Image (cartoon, coloured by chain):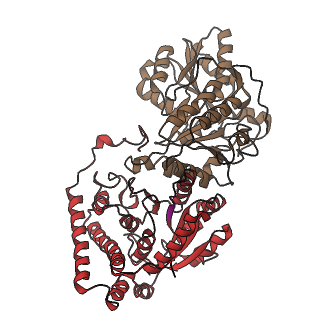
Chain colours: A red, B brown
Amino acid sequence: MTDKPHLDREHGQHLYRAMLRIRRFEAKCAELYQAQKIRGFLHLYDGEEAVAVGVMETLEDRDTIVATYRDHGHALARGLPMGALMAEMFGKVEGCARGRGGSMHFFDRARRFVGGNAIVGGGLPLAVGVALAEKERATGGLAACFFGEGAAGEGEFHESMNLAELWDLPVLFVCENNLYAMGVPLELAEAETDISRKAAAYRMPGAAVDGMNPVAVEAAARRAVDSIRSGAGPYFLECRTYRFRPHSMFDAQLYRTREEIDHWKERDPIPRTRKWLEENRMASAEELQAIEAGVDAEIEDAVAFAEKGTWESVEDLERFVLMDEVPQ
Amino acid sequence: MNTQTGTPGANRMTYREACRQAIRDALIADPRTFLMGEDVGLYGGCYAVSKGLLQEFGPGRIRDTPLAEAAFVGAGIGAAMAGMRPIVEIMTCNFSLLALDQIMNNAATIPHMSGGQFAVPLVIRMATGGGRQLAAQHSHSLEGWFAHIPGLKVLAPGTVEDARFMLKAALADPNPVLIFEHIVLYNAEGELGPAVTAVDIEKARIRRPGRDVSILTYGNSLPKSLEAAETLAGEGIEAEIVDLRVLRPLDDATIFESVARTRRCVIVDEGWKSGSVSAEIAARLSEHRFFDLDAPIRRVCSREVPVPYAAHMEEAALPQASQVVDAARSLVTGK
């Protein structure tokens, strides 16, 4: 198949590195949360790395990303500087939103990252609007919108799906189905638990893919992006995945069993990819070691950058409530 | 729905026609601007504001939307963030509640929350107010609610001139601007001075000067207050009518200056009294101008009920000129 990712050494290692980077970043975030360097709500992406990494491989600079409150993976895969993310969570002015958004609200204008949105479903209408603007101006750009399966319960999900298809807009809807909306299992929340089938109600092409496999996600996202760029309108991609950690740092996980978590951990995309690289002689032990060392060094630098950061002046508290101009 | 468009002379037009001309101007002036909302195209607008614009500008710029307030308001926000200058019409402010998430959590919030990286240069127009016997889901005045929210600008055109020119200023503003058009005013006629081609969206304006009492008001309560001032003049009381025009941010300077001069104040607001624009103004006056006042502040607001259908009941629920006269007279004469 022509839409299979070209899995040469470099690309295989790249996917592994991109996922490992997120996993270890999240581990550091959890540690810094315990140390009270990071406060507020913290939602970690462990287990779902293959989704952000696989999808982001298929996007270009001209595309726009709309993410959720669990946005670390999307931001890192999109190329937001790690130090700016860490500084954001430290509440420092060097953060990617001046320390105003925190973990749930990463923004980066230069990288067309229009925010982690912490209202479930709230980002979908924005993505539709961005796509409308791209289409009207014939930029060729698309809007990629990430959301969990919990969003399918929201009216904004259905309104946005309809509008995107009705107006043939270049939107890539990426549903990260991790089976739980906080603690509510899918089968307690949805009459139709096959989320990808919802696309059909809007005459939108939809597909479901193994969200624990970055290669499969990338291939599926490539098909979706090609379809969108051909002018065929929006595309719905459900990535079936699992969240290894609790919903946030305040979650006793009463709603799921240890066995279920362990079962999914057997499908952890990171060790699986590593094993695959090793078995297929796509990476030497030295190369893997270098990847790990590189990731660790980047994280160390990010933490140092955040530590060294400064606090926004309280005098600026009201700055940007109203804008003086539209940033260009 | 009344689709009467009035009888325009060279400079005479209805408020409805002024709204339409403003949209036309905006569409001609800026290719980034488009109008979207329910029934704005084929139907010509629920209140006939956009009648004829679909034929003139085509379906790409006059977009009929599904009944999906959250999605099309959110789409307006997304399009604005991505470089367009959309005008979104919400049929009535009662329906805006279906889009409240988008207006509050995204439009009003993202510029600040993103550390100033994204602006939302969006205009949302909506019909507001009662007086047409449309009952309790089409007659409320919710502008006061929106005026509570940092990050929004809230406009209430009470004259044909403001209906004609506020939109231009709103579109030039880098912030989300909400324009509340009063349903009773759509048929109101007014004269436009040939020299006027723009208005500001910062200042309150004195529509009738007077020395005895300041009547602060906006929207459809403006003509009612002007009528009251006429009656009061017959009794020898000179009321100053201040048209607030901009409900957020409030023009404290003009309000304070007027009240400092007249030393008496009536606030007329079609919103419910509790937690309203009138409550905010009264609070500011008591915080900052307490010693300028010779008498307690009086308020004439809607009764705290869902606005009913029956004409006599609706009339009793909304502020009326006679109540404004009574309130102002009692402040000035003590009777």
Q: Does any portion of residue B324 appear in the rendered image? A: yes
The vertical placement of B43 against A67, above or below, is above
Q: Position of residue B124 (x, y in %)?
A: 59, 42
Q: Position of residue A184 (x, y in %)?
A: 52, 74
Q: Does any portion of residue A252 appear in the rendered image? A: no
Q: Position of residue B132 (x, y in %)?
A: 76, 36
Measuring 60% from the left and 73% from the top, which residue is drawn there? Answer: A206
> In the rendered view, does B271 fall on the left or right side of A65?
right
Q: Position of residue B154 (x, y in %)?
A: 54, 36
Of residue A259 and residue A293, the one placed in the foreground of this image is A293
Res A79 quadrant in image: bottom left
Of residue A28 and residue B325, the one placed in the foreground of this image is A28
Q: Residue furthest bottom?
A: A279
Q: Magenta region: which residues?
A: A140-145
Measuring 42% from the left and 29% from the top, which residue is drawn there? Answer: B287
The vertical placement of A182 against A322, above or below, is below
Q: Is residue A65 magenta?
A: no
> In the rendered view, does A283 fall on the left or right side of A45?
left
